[in-house]
Image: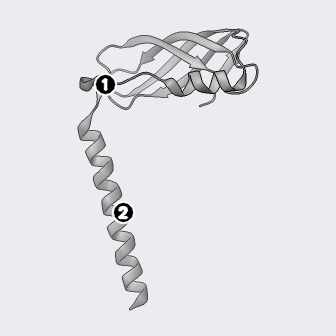
C-alpha cells in the first residue's frame, strides 16, 4: 500500500476483508521503509462496501527496521462476526474452478 503525503499528514486506500458495521474507526499505519514513521488516523468507509480511505498524521517513532516490520505485521485480530464467510467461500470456489479449468485445458492439449 502506498501512502500519499502532505507534510506530516497522509492518506491511503484500504480494503476490509469484511463489511464493517460502522462508517469509521481508528486506523494505525506503519511505514516499513525509512524513516519508519507510525501514523494515527481514521478509516472512513464507503457505505455498503468494503472500501475505505484512511486519513492520518505521521509521528516519528525512532524504530529500527526490525521494530517497524514487527509492528506492521502484528495487525489486529478479526472478531468472529467480522469475517464474511460468504466472500471467503466464493474465493475458495473460484480458485477450485480455475484449477479444474486449467486441468481440463492441459488434458485437451495432450490429446
Is residue 31 among what the camera can see?
Answer: no
Give the quadrant of residue 98. bottom left
Q: In the displayed structure, would residue 53 be above or below residue 40?
A: below
Q: In the displayed structure, would residue 40 be above or below residue 15?
A: above
Q: In the displayed structure, would residue 46 be above or below residue 95?
A: above
Question: Looking at the picture, how far across and down is residue 38, in whole percent?
Answer: 63, 14
Point 50% across, 24% down: residue:
74
State the residue in front, 48 or 79. Answer: 79
Residue ranking furthest to the right: 34
Which residue has dot 1 on it?
48
Point 29% across, 25% down: residue:
82
Q: Which badge, 2 or 1, is on the more N-terminal residue? A: 1
Question: Looking at the picture, how far across and down is residue 28, in whole percent?
Answer: 53, 15
Asked if residue 15 lies left or right of residue 33, the reply is left
Which residue has dot 2 on it?
98
Mark 1 lies on a secondary structure that is loop
Mark 2 lies on a secondary structure that is helix
Amino acid at each position: 500500500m502506498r501512502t500519499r503525503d502532505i507534510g506530516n499528514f497522509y492518506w491511503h486506500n484500504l480494503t476490509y476483508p469484511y463489511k464493517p458495521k460502522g462508517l469509521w474507526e481508528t486506523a494505525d499505519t506503519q511505514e516499513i521503509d525509512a524513516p519508519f514513521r507510525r501514523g494515527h488516523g481514521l478509516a472512513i468507509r464507503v457505505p455498503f462496501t468494503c472500501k475505505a480511505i484512511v486519513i492520518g498524521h505521521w509521528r516519528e517513532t525512532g524504530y529500527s527496521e526490525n521494530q517497524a516490520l514487527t509492528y506492521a505485521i502484528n495487525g489486529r485480530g478479526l472478531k468472529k462476526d467480522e469475517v464474511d464467510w460468504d466472500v471467503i467461500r466464493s474465493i475458495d470456489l473460484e480458485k477450485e474452478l480455475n484449477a479444474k479449468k486449467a486441468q481440463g485445458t492441459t488434458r485437451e492439449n495432450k490429446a
